[in-house]
Image (cartoon, rainbow, N blue to C red):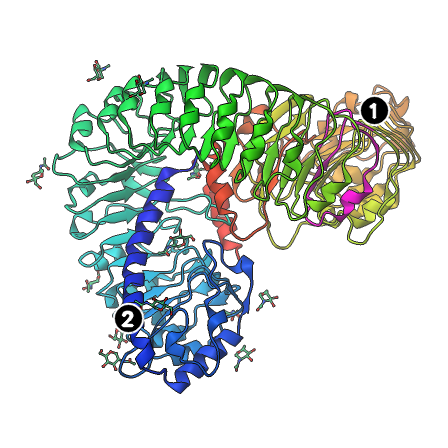
Amino acid sequence: MGFSPVLSLSQFLSSILFLFHFHTTISSSNYSSSSHFCAPDQSLSLLQFKESFSITSSASERCQHPKTESWREGTDCCSWDGVTCDMKTGQVTALDLACSMLYGTLHSNSTLFSLHHLQKLDLSDNDFNFSNISSRFGQFSNLTHLNLNFSGFAGQVPSESSHLSKLVTLDLSRNHYLSLEPISFDKLVRNLTQLRELDLSSVDMSLVVPNSLMNLSSSLSSLILNSCRLQGEFPFSMRKFKHLQQLDLRYNNFSDLGPWGCGLKGKFPGNIFLLPNLQVLDLTDNDDLTGSFPSFNASNIIRSLSLSHTAISVYLENDFFTNLKLLEVLALRQCNIIRSNLTLIGHLTELTSLNLIGNNLSGQIPSSFKNLVQLQSLYLGNNNFSGRIPEFLGNLTLLENLGLSNNQLSGPIPSQISTLSLRSFDLSKNNLHGPIPSSIFKQENLDVLSLASNNKLTGEISSSICKLKVLRLLDLSNNSLSGFIPQCLGNFSNSLSVLNLGKNNFQGTIFSPFSKGNNLGYLNLNGNELEGKIPSSIINCMMLQVLDLGDNKIEDTFPYFLETLPELYILALKSNKLHGFVNGPTTKNSFSKLRVFDISNNNLSGPLPIGYFNSFEAMMAYDQNPFYMMAYSIKVTWKGVEIEFEKIQSTLRILDLSNNSFTGEIPKEIGKLKAVRQLNLSHNSLTGHIQSSLGMFTNLESLDLSSNLLTGRIPVQLADLTFLAVLDLSHNRLEGPVPGGKQFNTFNASSFEGNLDLCGFPMPKECNNDEAPPLQPSNFHDGDDSKFFGEGFGWKAVAIGYGSGFVFGVTMGYVVFRTRKPAWFLKVVEDQWNLKARRTKKNARRNGARRN
Ligand SMILES: *[C@@H]1O[C@H](CO)[C@@H](O)[C@H](O)[C@H]1NC(C)=O
Ligand SMILES: *[C@@H]1O[C@H](CO)[C@@H](O)[C@H](O)[C@H]1NC(C)=O
Ligand SMILES: *[C@@H]1O[C@H](CO)[C@@H](O)[C@H](O)[C@H]1NC(C)=O
Ligand SMILES: *[C@@H]1O[C@H](CO)[C@@H](O)[C@H](O)[C@H]1NC(C)=O
Ligand SMILES: *[C@@H]1O[C@H](CO)[C@@H](O)[C@H](O)[C@H]1NC(C)=O
Ligand SMILES: *[C@@H]1O[C@H](CO)[C@@H](O)[C@H](O)[C@H]1NC(C)=O
Ligand SMILES: *[C@@H]1O[C@H](CO)[C@@H](O)[C@H](O)[C@H]1NC(C)=O
Ligand SMILES: *[C@@H]1O[C@H](CO)[C@@H](O)[C@H](O)[C@H]1NC(C)=O
Ligand SMILES: *[C@@H]1O[C@H](CO)[C@@H](O)[C@H](O)[C@H]1NC(C)=O
Ligand SMILES: *[C@@H]1O[C@H](CO)[C@@H](O)[C@H](O)[C@H]1NC(C)=O
Ligand SMILES: *[C@@H]1O[C@H](CO)[C@@H](O)[C@H](O)[C@H]1NC(C)=O
Ligand SMILES: *[C@@H]1O[C@H](CO)[C@@H](O)[C@H](O)[C@H]1NC(C)=O
């Protein structure tokens, strides 16, 4: 995994540009406040404004300064935090409430709009709870700076924005539910002739014609429109943007709520490099942009170039490297640069970030990279680099982010890296072996550490791991690590969010206790040799969304205490030695958010847990509101084949109680769990009839009731389950006709074998006339998994190659996030996902349209 350097750099640059302007002006003028008192009406307006919001920490993410808390009646409002007044008149001229943790609706009757003299207004990084941007913003006729970045505004950008003809900077970015109509946009670009910096990232501009931007060509120095759904031909004549220094038209799939991108098409505007002032160019993820990369003019001053994942074929001529000596950021993810001479990259000695992910590059990592002494981020993942991890990396002393995942690197992890000060370190999916050098744990700034998969790392985890106090993601899964897991991992640090130690040979009991207030969202210990009981202190993991303890040797009764975990989505306890009855719930709202409940392969007995069937609310219907659910790594079983893939999906629902000793009948209550997609009750001792209410499970894709003692007929309602791809009713005592037609035509005899009294196609036994069911033509569209994926966030898994009709037997791994802004994690997984998941444009659009 790796952070996309482009992402951070261009944003970083823009924020610097912006903040610089903004803050210098504000702070240089506040000395005036002591001598001039605030006009009383202004004071009152501010106080009323303050009163209309609450202060909540979740409202601001980037930073938190609850500025309004210092505002007191009876004091000079010009001295209040975030407030700047005009020296002479005492009128408020600037209001900077960035990161002020404000939460609530900003109505159009807000007293904010009484501050007529505002010139600068910054409300960024608050949570205005889907407020519309009031048309009254258009009344701030003297406004020069407006920043509503990342503040939860929604709806249409009012056309009155075009009245703000003095605006120099306008930032409405990252309000994921905002849209901008062509008519408003046209007015805006025609009237805002002073505009130098424009950032509308994530605003839905799908109807806007890119060419209208030409109206801004003479003024703009920075244009940032990433994830804006802008579509159409790219080359508006770029050469006219004489002052442009920064152009970011990147499409960012991870715009918090879903993928919608720029979708620019046409030929790559080679002449863009003739812009005399262009320093930053980011066209990442405009995958319809074609053409080839121009040769460069030595006079170019470009510092940051990102063409990742465009269809531009990038062949870097040798003089690229000699002409672009100033380059600090080079991002060419999936750019097919294979013919370029990589050795020459060693000439770009100013590089701070290099991203060559996914280019099919092979051979050793070029030794000329040792000259890149300014490197802070190096991403070479998803290539075929082989050989050892070069020791010279230890000499790149500024290196903070190192992503080498998914290559063929072999040998041990060099201990030289201990001299670095890494923040993210990803060596997953290579052929590394040997122990984890304890020097890794000296990297006290480590935020993300992944050594997972394909590697064969051995030995124990040194307890010095306990020193990594800021670690957020630790993934050592799929190795051959052994010994005890350091106990400190339970109360390790409140930053740890993702912990995956699955598929190793760890022994002993599960570490504990888990401390109160921890932040763990994902805990996967699947596939180890862990024994003993499930520690009850897990209930301190109030954020836990995924808990997978499957495939261990846990000997315990059913852990009812897990019911109290308020955010639990996925509970997998399969293949352990759980025993006894399961007759919860013991509390209210128990497991109400659970989407996957897998307790298969244990020794559980007694009746099926009817009580839980009544409380699994999330399995009864899909949520109205989409939530963030990210598969950090999912393995599914499909007819015995394990498939690993990574994607976002919000509709996964699995109930698996198979291979236990449950007895009694299948209760009617099961019919409530209509949203379930895979139901497996096989290999138990269930008796009675198959509930016809299973016919209500309209999303069911797999139904396995095999190897029980079920009697009676197969309910004809099952034939209506259009998505059913796998059916196994074998080895029961069922009788009568196999329902014909529709879905049932797709199943062969193995689905029904071992039921001696079943008759009719596909069974060998003929039915008597009175038994024969009517035959209906099949309308099953084999191979269509679009329903399954379509309801996620528009992601399609690459696992498609494995065939149709997915059936899920989850063995490991999900990360689910429900926060409004799971930004850090998105960055972490972004690059890995890019290769794995393909967006379907149609879905992107539909999801976009569905956003309100
Ligand atoms: C806008 O918000 C993003 C995310 O919080 C931040 O990275 C960026 O710096 C902000 N831009 C400005 C101009 O404040
Ligand atoms: C502005 O006001 C703040 C808080 O009152 C104070 O800390 C700061 O020094 C002032 N800045 C200037 C330039 O006077
Ligand atoms: C935020 O919006 C939701 C849904 O529109 C509403 O139920 C809630 O009351 C709002 N909260 C505030 C503080 O306005
Ligand atoms: C402002 O408008 C909202 C919604 O229309 C209303 O609930 C609120 O009471 C109004 N506030 C004032 C101060 O009039
Ligand atoms: C806007 O600025 C102009 C020129 O500086 C000034 O004359 C006018 O009073 C200002 N208007 C407001 C509402 O502050
Ligand atoms: C936003 O504006 C739309 C359209 O004018 C309206 O339907 C909606 O109720 C408004 N929302 C709020 C929170 O005021
Ligand atoms: C353009 O700006 C002026 C103020 O400078 C304003 O009076 C006029 O209404 C604006 N025009 C549009 C179309 O918004
Ligand atoms: C804006 O573009 C329109 C149409 O392209 C043109 O007629 C108009 O003159 C332009 N206005 C400015 C200020 O560039
Ligand atoms: C290179 O840049 C110089 C100076 O800007 C310019 O005169 C020349 O035409 C450019 N050459 C090419 C091939 O674009
Ligand atoms: C790549 O560049 C290096 C350094 O100039 C040179 O030695 C090498 O021969 C080049 N390789 C190829 C394949 O051209
Ligand atoms: C790292 O730097 C040291 C000191 O400059 C040098 O002696 C050593 O050879 C370098 N190591 C590698 C692998 O380049
Ligand atoms: C965006 O989505 C496309 C299609 O799924 C994918 O190929 C690309 O890598 C993604 N880019 C990012 C930045 O996530």
Say whether residue 60 is left or right of residue 305: right
Q: Does the rendering let one see residue 475?
A: no
Residue 29 disc label: 2
| CB at disc 2 and ligand 2 closer than 8 Å | yes
In the foreground, 674 or 594 = 594
- The kind of residue tagged 2 is Ser
Where residue 552 sits in the image (x, y, percent)?
74, 25
Span shown in magenta: 549-577
Say if 817 sits above or below 684 in the image. Answer: below
Residue with the mark numbered 1: 730
Say whether residue 687 is left or right of residue 648: right
The residue that appears at 46% across and 76% down in the rendered structure is 108
The residue that appears at 59% across and 27% down in the rendered structure is 644
Q: Quadrant of residue 435?
A: top right
In the foreground, 740 or 324 = 324
Q: Quadrant of residue 80?
A: bottom left
Mark 1 to mark 2 CA distance (whole Å): 80 Å
Extreme residue toward the bottom, this view? 40
Where residue 339 sits in the image (x, y, percent)?
27, 20
- The image quadrant where one finds the C terminus is bottom right
Where residue 752 sits in the image (x, y, percent)?
82, 24
Query: What secondary structure is found at the residue carrying circle 2?
Result: helix
Say whether residue 314 is left or right of residue 132: left
